[in-house]
Structure formats: C-alpha cells, structure tokens
Image (cartoon, grey):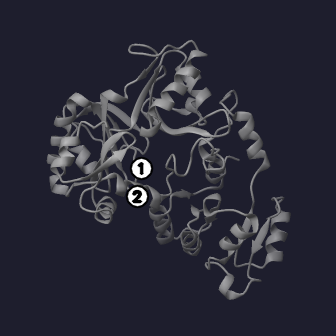
C-alpha cells in the first residue's frame, strides 16, 4: 500500500487510517462531525496527495483536450481552472477532472486517485492520434508520484494561505490559480476545493512536503487549523451535492444523466468523444414539472402564451393544503409517477420554501434571484445553495440550452 509524503504526520496525530485508492489515508482524526464543522466554521487541512496530476503539453495540447473532455477548454486563459469530465466512447464517464491552463501549450489535469492508471492509459491512447508521445520530457507526462497536495478549506483558509506567500492572494477569484512560491516551495496555489466552504489547494513536490507542512501549521495556529480526514471530506462534498466518481458517476453514467450538462459544451468545432450521443440525449430532453401556488389552468395558460414547452405535470393550488409546496408530496409523486430517483431531479426556485422542499427529498436545488431583490433571501440562497443564478441567461447556460 502506498503512503503520501505527509503520512508520518497523520500517524503522529493519531489518525484513524484506512486504505483508499491504493493509499494508506487518514479517514478521521477527532471525529467526522467535529471535523466537518471545523471546515464549515474555521479552517481544516486535508492531505489529498493521492490525487493524480497529468501534464499535457505542446502545439496539439488544446486539440487533444477538446477531443477528450466535454467542457470547452478554448475558453480558458492562463491561470484559469475548469471542471470537466472525460467521456469513454460508450456514453459513460472515464473520470471527472480539473483542467489547469498554464499557457497556450501547457495544461495540467488533476484526476481522481482511483482512476490515475485508467485516465493515463486513456489519455495516451487518444494522444497517439495527435502524434503525441508519453514519458518524461514528452508531451504527455504522468507526474502523480512526484507531487503532494494539501487542501486548506474553510472561511479562514485564505487568511492562512496569505501568510505563506509574499503577495496578495486572499481575493483570488474562484477557479483560478498561480504558479508561485508557497512557504518558499515551488508550488501551484489553486482556489479550488471539494467542500463548498472556500479555500485553496496547494500542489508541491514531494521533496518539499516537510517544509510546506511545518509552515502551514505555523501559519494556521492563530486560526485554529485542524487536521481533517477523508470521512469529513465526503460529508462536506455530499452536503454541497458534488459528484463522487464511483458513487454518483462512473463508466455507465452519461454527463447529462448525472446533471453535468453545465460542463458539456456543444461548441462549434468541438468534436469531443460521444458528442453525437450526447446531442441526441439533449435533444430528447427531460421532464418539466411545475410546483406552484398558482392554479394549474393558469400555469398551463401562461406556458402556452409564452410558447414554452407544456409541463409534464403541474402541482398547483388545486391540490389539498397538505400536498402543496413546501410539502414533499410533489417531488415524491414525480419520482413515483415517472420512475425516477432523487438524483434524477433538479428543483429551481427563488424562495426558501422551495429549498426546504428539495432538501427534505434529497433533490438538487438551483436558486434564481431575478424575481426578487430582497437581500436576506439572496444572502441565504448564496450561502446555502450549490447554485445561484441572477439572470435567465446564466440559468440557461447552466442547463445547456
């Protein structure tokens, strides 16, 4: 079983260890609930060095990435990160990944630990069609065994990170990164994470692991930095609705079926693997069900008057009080009528009752804010919802329309 460069620190801290993706990893330190709340309210550090890093370089780098990923890599600029996935040619997903653009001919992919070898083989196979070679000093290089990674997450995380660098980083935008020195180590400082609580992820060479670890804990002392295991990492991502490969998505799951239409871009000239299949899935569309405090005949009249698709089901004021929003009945009935599960649904609303309804049924929720200008409502939605959209075009882009 492999160990990370920080293994000795986990043992010294009394971590409960277990095998994960071939690594001996810390699952918990002081308890999952305690660690979960530490990240939500303060700052915690995760050892995520088991994740993989693959470099894609050269004049054909963009062409290859446009072929093997669903998102539009051409939209990236130097210092920008993109969430994407790699389709497998059979309608499923090889892996969900992060794409880092360093420059026009240099990209780094962060891949899931359990999929490193599978991803690497897939990328090399596809790269050969573009005349790209694999190995040290070549266009394709698997650097996973050379790099360690720490995720510093929580509302106080960037205050800690700021103490490790010599220039302002606290206000770096989400999904951007810098190649810079962190604690005097050559590193990538990435404003990303898997918790929904803000913070950063730091990539460095294994040789610098001790220096980085010691500096991080010194910087984090005044902010109450805590060790966090993979157990809390899972509860944190689950609470925010982030996909986990092997659980929510896999080789049999289409990105569109998984609710990842927002990272599936049918851009002109982007001939990605499985595009024709996904275009057919998109054309077939899904169900539109309306849950409202208006009467059903008024809802259907308004949809028709605005040339909108006719709803497949309407749950309006006609229903008994105990079955109206925010009661869970409409969502439960949709799942029963159409043979769906909670993971197949997405609820869109502009008020908290809709959020409460979705939460009670385990259904994903997207908040929209163009129907009201009440700051307290917007603040609640932005804080608690995985997605928040202030305009119709933003929502349309997310839905892939």
The answer to whether residue 201 is above or below residue 321 is above
> Position of 140 compared to 398: left or right?
left
- Give the crowd class for mark 1: few <14, some 14-19, many >=20 residues within 10 Å: many
Q: Residue at x 49, y 38 (%)?
A: 97
Pointer 2 with pointer 1, Cβ within 8 A: yes
Q: Of label 2 and label 1, which has the lower sequence position?
A: 1
**CA–CA distance between discs 2 and 1?**
8 Å
Residue on which the image places disc 2: 236
Q: Position of residue 88 (x, y in %)?
A: 62, 34
- Give the crowd class for mark 2: few <14, some 14-19, many >=20 residues within 10 Å: many
Rendered-image quadrant of the N terminus: top left
Residue on which the image places disc 1: 194
The quarter of the picture where residue 184 lies is: top left
Q: Position of residue 127 (x, y in %)?
A: 55, 19
Q: Residue at x 71, y 40 (%)?
A: 278
Question: Does residue 112 appear anywhere in the picture?
Answer: no
The answer to whether residue 393 is above or below residue 60 is below
Q: Position of residue 321 (x, y in %)?
A: 68, 87
Outermost residue toward the bottom in this view: 321
Question: Does residue 283 appear anywhere in the picture?
Answer: yes
Q: Which residue is nearer to you in this view: 155 or 129?
A: 129
Q: Position of residue 185 (x, y in %)?
A: 22, 30
Q: Label 1's element? A: loop
């Amino acid at each position: 079983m492999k160990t990370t460069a920080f293994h000795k620190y986990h043992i010294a801290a009394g971590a409960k260890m277990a095998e994960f993706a071939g690594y001996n990893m810390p699952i918990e330190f002081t308890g999952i609930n305690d660690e979960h709340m530490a990240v939500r309210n303060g700052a915690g550090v995760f050892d995520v060095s088991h994740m993989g890093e693959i470099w894609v370089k050269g004049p054909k780098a963009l062409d290859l990435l446009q072929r093997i990923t669903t998102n539009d890599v051409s939209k990236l600029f130097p210092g920008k990160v993109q969430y994407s996935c790699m389709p497998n040619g059979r309608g499923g997903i090889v892996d969900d990944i992060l794409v880092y653009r360093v420059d026009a001919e240099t990209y780094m992919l962060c891949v899931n630990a359990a999929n490193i070898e599978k991803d690497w083989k897939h990328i090399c196979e596809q790269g050969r069609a573009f005349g790209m070679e694999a190995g040290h000093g070549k266009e394709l290089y698997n650097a996973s065994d050379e790099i360690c990674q720490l995720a510093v997450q929580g509302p106080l995380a960037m205050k800690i990170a700021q103490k490790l660098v010599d220039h302002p980083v606290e206000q770096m935008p989400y999904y951007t990164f810098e190649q810079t020195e962190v604690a005097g180590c050559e590193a990538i400082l990435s404003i990303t994470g898997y918790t929904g609580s803000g913070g950063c992820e730091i990539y460095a060479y294994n040789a610098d692991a001790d220096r980085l670890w010691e500096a991080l804990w010194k910087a984090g002392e005044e902010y109450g930095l805590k060790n966090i295991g993979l157990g809390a990492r899972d509860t944190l991502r689950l609470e925010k609705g982030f996909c986990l490969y092997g659980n929510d998505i896999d080789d049999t799951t289409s990105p569109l079926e998984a609710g990842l239409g927002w990272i599936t871009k049918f851009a002109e000239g982007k001939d990605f693997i499985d595009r024709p299949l996904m275009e057919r899935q998109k054309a077939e569309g899904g169900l539109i069900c309306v849950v409202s405090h208006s009467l059903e005949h008024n809802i259907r009249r308004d949809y028709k008057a605005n040339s909108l698709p006719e709803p497949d089901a309407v749950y309006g004021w006609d229903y008994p009080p105990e079955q109206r929003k925010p009661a869970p009945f409409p969502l439960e009935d949709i799942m029963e009528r159409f043979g769906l599960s909670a993971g197949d649904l997405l609820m869109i609303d502009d008020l908290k009752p809709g959020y409460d309804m979705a939460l009670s049924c385990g259904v994903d929720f997207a908040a929209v804010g163009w129907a009201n200008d009440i700051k307290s409502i917007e603040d609640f939605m932005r804080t608690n919802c995985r997605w928040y959209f202030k305009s119709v075009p933003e929502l349309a882009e997310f839905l892939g329309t």
